């Protein structure tokens, strides 16, 4: 297949693009290398992809509609895997205009470019955060209690709706994948596995909300990649599908796991959780199992051990 991956230099995007290239696909990567976190880390990810002869990099901002349209027109892609976005719930709280601009308008630019180029299928990275604070456990795709708590998930939900609109009007296949707490090698420095590991290594204090009595459905990057690739291979009309592990972990236990890997105790404060944070995320993955043959393989203990190996090799200098 010939596939465009947006956000290709990021954490999830670089893993997806690398897996596609490894199986023999032709991949074009689109990224603007913004400075939300170190562009050098993204350049290093892109360098991994650049070692494949079937990879082409386009340094383009999603908000540049003409440039996105040009890439799609020239690429004549079989599918677009749209992972590029502004992420992070807490960072979005006071930056709603930026998140709308990148995550909503940028997604519309991708959809328009795909429509005009005749690209038949778009896979979109959504988030478990769209479910917000709900008593409906586990989270199911048909759950009517969709109540995002911050601009980031709100913009992701809006993009899901735009995908439905393009499917309805133009018969574009659109699969929205709601990711649950993705972690693993190359993980972003703003994500909790990295924050906690780095703080423990350097003897620094970090915050653990509600004394760790919150739960997150941690999902290893390789399992997410398998789900994304299956979605790219299977146009399904319009679908929203959870990609998680389906086994929420108590955050206090997650920190204890990292303490054991690093071999040092954590130093933390335990303030109340802000209003942007739900007490639990918990994926019902039965739809992914049925439609994508999705079967997560990596336990949190194994996945964090692999993250720790990467951290030691790449971050401890």
Image (cartoon, grey):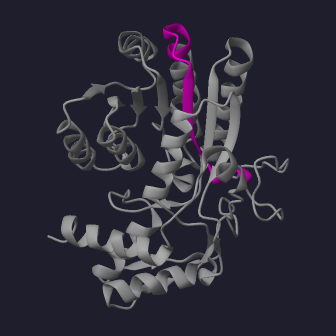
Residue 90's place in the image compared with 272, above or below, is: above
Quadrant for the N terminus in the image: top left
Asked if residue 31 shows in the view, the reply is: no
Q: Which residues are magenta?
A: 113-131
Residue 61, picture quadrant: top left
Residue 124 falls within the magenta-colored stretch:
yes
Relative horizontal placement of residue 162, taking residue 197 as reference (left or right): right
Residue 36's place in the image compared with 56, above or below, is: below
Count of residue discs: 0
Q: Position of residue 264 (x, y in %)?
A: 33, 90
Identified at 31% across, 38% down, the residue is 21
Residue 102's place in the image compared with 226, above or below, is: above
Residue 223's place in the image compared with 121, above or below, is: below
- Which one is in front, 3 or 164? 3
Residue 135 falls within the magenta-colored stretch:
no
Identified at 82% across, 50% down, the residue is 143
Q: Position of residue 16 (x, y in %)?
A: 40, 44
Identified at 34% across, 40% down, the residue is 23
């Amino acid at each position: 297949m010939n596939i465009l991956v947006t956000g290709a230099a990021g954490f999830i995007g670089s893993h997806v693009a690398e897996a596609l290239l490894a199986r023999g696909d032709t991949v074009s990567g689109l990224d603007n290398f913004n400075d939300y976190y170190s562009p050098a880390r993204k350049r290093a990810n892109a360098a991994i992809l650049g070692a494949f002869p079937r990879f082409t990099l386009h340094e383009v901002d999603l908000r540049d509609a003409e440039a996105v349209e040009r890439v799609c027109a020239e690429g004549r892609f079989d599918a677009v895997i749209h992972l590029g976005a502004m992420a992070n719930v807490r960072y979005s709280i006071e930056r709603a205009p930026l998140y709308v601009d990148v995550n909503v308008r940028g997604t519309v630019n991708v959809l328009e470019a795909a429509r005009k180029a005749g690209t038949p299928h778009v896979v979109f990275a959504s988030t478990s955060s769209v479910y917000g604070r709900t008593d409906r456990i586990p989270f199911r795709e048909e759950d009517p209690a969709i109540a995002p708590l911050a601009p980031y998930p709100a913009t992701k939900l809006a993009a899901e709706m735009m995908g439905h609109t393009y499917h309805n009007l133009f018969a574009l296949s659109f699969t929205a994948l709601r990711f649950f707490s993705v972690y693993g090698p190359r993980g972003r420095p703003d994500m909790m596995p990295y924050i906690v590991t780095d703080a423990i290594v350097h003897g620094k204090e970090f915050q653990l909300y509600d004394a760790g009595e919150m739960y997150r459905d941690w999902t290893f990057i390789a399992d997410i990649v398998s789900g994304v690739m299956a979605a790219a291979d299977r146009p399904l009309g319009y679908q929203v599908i959870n990609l998680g592990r389906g086994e929420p972990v108590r955050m206090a236990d997650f920190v204890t796991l990292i303490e054991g890997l690093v071999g040092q105790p954590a130093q933390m404060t335990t303030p109340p959780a802000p209003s942007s944070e739900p007490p639990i995320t918990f994926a019902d993955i039965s739809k992914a199992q049925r439609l994508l043959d999705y079967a997560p393989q990596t336990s949190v203990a194994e996945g964090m051990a692999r993250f720790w190996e990467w951290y030691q090799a790449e971050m401890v200098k």
